[in-house]
Image (cartoon, grey):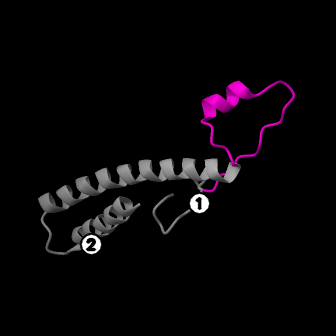
Amino acid sequence: MKNFESNLERLEQLSENIKRSNITLEEALKSFEEGIKLAKGMEKELDSIEGRIQILMNGDSLPEEKKSSKKTAGTEEEPVLDLFSGTTELNGTRA
Protein backbone atom coordinates (compact mmCIF):
# COMPACT_ATOMS: atom_id res chain seq x y z
CA MET A 1 0.00 0.00 0.00
CA LYS A 2 2.81 2.41 0.79
CA ASN A 3 4.17 1.92 -2.73
CA PHE A 4 0.73 2.72 -4.16
CA GLU A 5 0.52 5.90 -2.11
CA SER A 6 3.99 7.05 -3.19
CA ASN A 7 3.10 6.29 -6.84
CA LEU A 8 -0.09 8.32 -6.48
CA GLU A 9 1.92 11.21 -5.04
CA ARG A 10 4.38 11.00 -7.96
CA LEU A 11 1.50 10.92 -10.44
CA GLU A 12 0.10 14.09 -8.91
CA GLN A 13 3.54 15.74 -9.18
CA LEU A 14 3.76 14.76 -12.86
CA SER A 15 0.30 16.16 -13.48
CA GLU A 16 1.24 19.48 -11.91
CA ASN A 17 4.48 19.50 -13.89
CA ILE A 18 2.62 19.10 -17.19
CA LYS A 19 0.32 22.00 -16.31
CA ARG A 20 3.23 24.45 -15.97
CA SER A 21 3.18 27.20 -18.56
CA ASN A 22 6.96 27.15 -19.09
CA ILE A 23 7.36 23.41 -19.70
CA THR A 24 8.91 22.26 -22.96
CA LEU A 25 7.15 19.77 -25.18
CA GLU A 26 9.91 17.21 -24.52
CA GLU A 27 9.58 17.59 -20.73
CA ALA A 28 5.80 17.31 -20.96
CA LEU A 29 6.08 14.16 -23.07
CA LYS A 30 8.51 12.54 -20.61
CA SER A 31 6.22 13.38 -17.69
CA PHE A 32 3.22 12.05 -19.58
CA GLU A 33 4.98 8.76 -20.43
CA GLU A 34 6.05 8.25 -16.81
CA GLY A 35 2.52 9.04 -15.65
CA ILE A 36 0.98 6.51 -18.01
CA LYS A 37 3.36 3.78 -16.78
CA LEU A 38 2.59 4.64 -13.16
CA ALA A 39 -1.18 4.68 -13.78
CA LYS A 40 -1.11 1.25 -15.48
CA GLY A 41 0.86 -0.25 -12.60
CA MET A 42 -1.47 1.31 -10.07
CA GLU A 43 -4.50 -0.05 -11.92
CA LYS A 44 -3.04 -3.57 -11.71
CA GLU A 45 -2.44 -3.09 -8.00
CA LEU A 46 -6.03 -1.89 -7.50
CA ASP A 47 -7.32 -4.94 -9.36
CA SER A 48 -5.27 -7.18 -7.05
CA ILE A 49 -6.58 -5.38 -3.98
CA GLU A 50 -10.15 -5.67 -5.28
CA GLY A 51 -9.69 -9.43 -5.66
CA ARG A 52 -8.41 -9.74 -2.10
CA ILE A 53 -11.34 -7.68 -0.79
CA GLN A 54 -13.85 -9.83 -2.66
CA ILE A 55 -12.32 -12.99 -1.21
CA LEU A 56 -12.54 -11.52 2.30
CA MET A 57 -16.11 -10.27 1.81
CA ASN A 58 -17.25 -13.66 0.50
CA GLY A 59 -15.50 -15.54 3.28
CA ASP A 60 -13.61 -17.68 0.80
CA SER A 61 -9.98 -18.56 1.12
CA LEU A 62 -9.94 -20.82 -1.94
CA PRO A 63 -8.89 -19.58 -5.37
CA GLU A 64 -11.63 -19.48 -8.02
CA GLU A 65 -10.34 -22.65 -9.77
CA LYS A 66 -10.55 -24.76 -6.62
CA LYS A 67 -14.00 -23.42 -5.74
CA SER A 68 -15.44 -24.44 -9.08
CA SER A 69 -13.99 -27.95 -8.84
CA LYS A 70 -15.54 -28.45 -5.38
CA LYS A 71 -19.08 -27.45 -6.43
CA THR A 72 -21.62 -30.20 -6.70
CA ALA A 73 -24.81 -30.33 -8.72
CA GLY A 74 -27.72 -28.51 -7.12
CA THR A 75 -25.70 -26.25 -4.86
CA GLU A 76 -26.09 -22.51 -5.08
CA GLU A 77 -23.17 -20.15 -5.51
CA GLU A 78 -22.64 -17.39 -2.97
CA PRO A 79 -23.13 -13.86 -4.36
CA VAL A 80 -20.02 -11.88 -5.18
CA LEU A 81 -19.88 -8.28 -4.02
CA ASP A 82 -18.58 -5.97 -6.69
CA LEU A 83 -17.16 -3.16 -4.59
CA PHE A 84 -15.22 -1.50 -7.40
CA SER A 85 -17.32 -1.76 -10.51
CA GLY A 86 -16.27 0.13 -13.62
CA THR A 87 -18.84 2.83 -12.86
CA THR A 88 -17.54 3.58 -9.36
CA GLU A 89 -15.25 6.58 -9.07
CA LEU A 90 -12.67 6.62 -6.28
CA ASN A 91 -11.13 10.04 -5.73
CA GLY A 92 -11.19 10.61 -9.48
CA THR A 93 -8.70 7.81 -10.10
CA ARG A 94 -10.96 5.35 -11.91
CA ALA A 95 -13.58 5.80 -14.54
> As displayed, is residue 12 above or below residue 33?
below
- Disc 2 marks which amino acid? Glu
Magenta stretch in the rendered image: 59-83
Answer with left or right where residue 59 lies relative to residue 85: right
User: In the current view of this chain or complex, which residue is farthest to the right?
Assistant: 74
* Front position in the image: 44 or 89: 44
Residue 16 numbered tag: 2
Could you tell me which secondary element the residue under label 2 belongs to?
Answer: helix
Residue pointed to by mark 1: 88
Percent coordinates x, y for residue 91 in the rendering? 49, 69
Answer with left or right where residue 45 lies relative to residue 36: right
The image quadrant that residue 18 belongs to is: bottom left
Q: Quadrant of the N terminus?
A: bottom left
In the image, residue 78 lies in the stretch drawn in magenta = yes
User: In the current view of this chain or complex, which residue is farthest to the front?
Assistant: 61
Residue 1 numbered tag: none
Q: Residue at x 70, y 47 (%)?
A: 80
* Front position in the image: 30 or 51: 51
Q: Residue at x 62, y 47 (%)?
A: 55
